[in-house]
Amino acid sequence: MLRRAPRSSVRTSAMTETSNGPTAAPADRRLDLPHPLDEGAAPRFGGTAPVEHLRGVLSACCESSASEVRGRFLILTHMGPDPDALGACEGLRLLLEKGFGHDCVVATHGKVHRAENVALLETLELDLADYESTDVSGFCGVLLVDTQPAFRHTVVPAAPAVVAVFDHHRSPQSDAGAREIPHEDVRVDLGATSSILFEYLRDAGVALDERTASALFCGIRYDTADLSRNASPLDEEAYIETFKLGDRPRIAAIDNPPLSRSYYRHVAQALTTARQHGPLIIALLGRVENPEHVAEMADFFLRMKGCSWVVAGGAFEESYVLSLRTDYSFGKAYPLIERVLGDEGSFGGHGHIAGGRIPMEDPGQSAIGSIERRLLKNALAVISASSEDGAEAPDGRRLDE
Ligand SMILES: [Mn+2]
C-alpha cells in the first residue's frame, strides 16, 4: 500500500518567515535554492482540497477576464529550468488541459545548459515557448511552479496577475509586502514541486500519460537524489507511481545524456587547474563556455577519496559562478559558501550543495584573476580555522602528483 501525503503539509502564506538560523544570509544575498526539511506547516485553503481550491480560483479568474483571453493560462518557472521545474510545468499543463479544460502555454526563460536538462527537453519533446517572444497579453492568468514571484531568478509579467504558485522553497523574507496570490501552495517539507503536481493530478482523477509521468519522475528523481534526501511520503508515492507509468527507455536516456566536446575540454582544464589542500579540492577555472560545467566539476571532484569539500568556480558572461559541495564531514554547504564568498555576491544552499554568483562589471582576465585569488584565500582560511592547532592550510598539490 502506498502511503498518502498528509494534507496538513501545505504552508500558509500568512506564516511569518522563520530565520534559517545563525548562518542565514541577508535576504538580498540569498539565491533561491531549496532548504532542508521544515516541520510545522499548517493547513490552508479553508479545509478545501488543494485541487478543488485551484479549480475555483481559475474559474473565478476566467469569469473576471475578457472573452478573448478567458480560459487561457500561462505557466512559468525559474530561469534555467531544472528537471523538477520542467516536470512540474508538464504536470500542471496536463492538469489544466485534461482536469479543468483550460488552454495553456508553458514558457521558459533563459537557456537550458546542463546536459541532463537538455536531454529531458529533447527526449520527451517538451513543447515549450520562449518567454521573451510570448505575448503575455493573450492570457488571463499566470501560474508559477518551483519558484515564487519574489525570487530573483524568476521573471513574471506585470500583467496578467499570478493566480497560483506551487513550490517547495522557503519564501524569501523580502516578500512580506508582495501581492496576494489567490492559490499559493508552498510546501517546504517536500523534496520536489513535481510531487505537488502529482498529488493534484491524482486528486483530480487525471490519468498520467507516458510523457508527463516521465517528466514528473525526472523532477522528483533529481531533486531528491532518488529519494535519498528531503523525501516525504508524498515524494515516495509520486516517484513510484510516475516510474510505473513513465517511458523507461527515455528515462534512462535522460540520465545518461550525450555530453558536448566542451564538457571534455572542461574536464581536461579542471584536472590541470584543480589543487588539493588537505580535505579541499579547489578548481577555479577562469572563463567557462557553459556555467553548468562549474557545478559538474564540483560533483566530479567530490567523489575523490580524501576529499571532503570542493569549491569550483568559473566566469560566465557578467558573473563569476561558484559551486560548493561537501560530504558533511567538513560541515554544511551553506555556512561554508558564505565564508568562501566573504562579503561578495549572492548565494544559497542546503545540505551538501551550495551555489553563489559574483556580478562582474568588467569581466576581463584581471578581474577574474583577482576574484579567484580572493576565493582561494577565503577557502584556505576556512581550513586553517578548522584545523585543531590553527596551522596554515597545506600547500596545494596538483592532482597528477
Ligand atoms: Mn524543485
Image: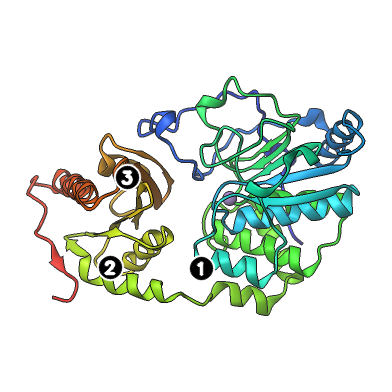
The answer to whether residue 203 is visible is: no
Residue 334 point in image, percent of width and height: 37, 43
Residue 126 point in image, percent of width and height: 70, 64
Q: Amino acid at mark 1?
A: Ala
Q: Secondary structure at mark 2?
A: helix
Question: Distance from label 2 to label 3 (Cα)?
Answer: 20 Å
- Residue under numbered circle 2: 270
Viewer-side label of 2, 3: 2
Query: Mark 1 and mark 3 in contact (Cβ < 8 Å)?
Result: no
- Residue under numbered circle 3: 337
Query: Mark 3 and mark 2 in contact (Cβ < 8 Å)?
Result: no
Question: Distance from label 1 to label 2 (Cα)?
Answer: 18 Å
Q: Amino acid at mark 2?
A: Ala
- As drawn, 117 above or below 193: below
Q: Secondary structure at mark 1?
A: helix
Q: Secondary structure at mark 3?
A: helix
N-terminal-most mark, 2 or 3: 2
Q: Residue 344's mark? A: none
Horizontal placement of 114 versus 358: left or right?
right
Residue closer to the observer: 110 or 76: 110
Classed neighbour count for the residue bearing mark 1: other residues with Cα under 10 Å, few (<14), some (14–19), many (≥20): many
Horizontal placement of 190 versus 21: left or right?
right
**Residue drawn at (66%, 24%) of the image:** 179
Q: Amino acid at mark 3?
A: Ile
Q: Is mark 1 within 8 Å of ligand 1?
A: no
Q: Quadrant of residue 241?
A: bottom right
Residue 265 point in image, percent of width and height: 33, 74
Question: Distance from label 3 to label 1 (Cα)?
Answer: 25 Å
- Residue under numbered circle 1: 115
Residue closer to the observer: 191 or 400: 400
N-terminal-most mark, 1 or 2: 1
Single out the residue that lies furthest toward the top.
Answer: 177
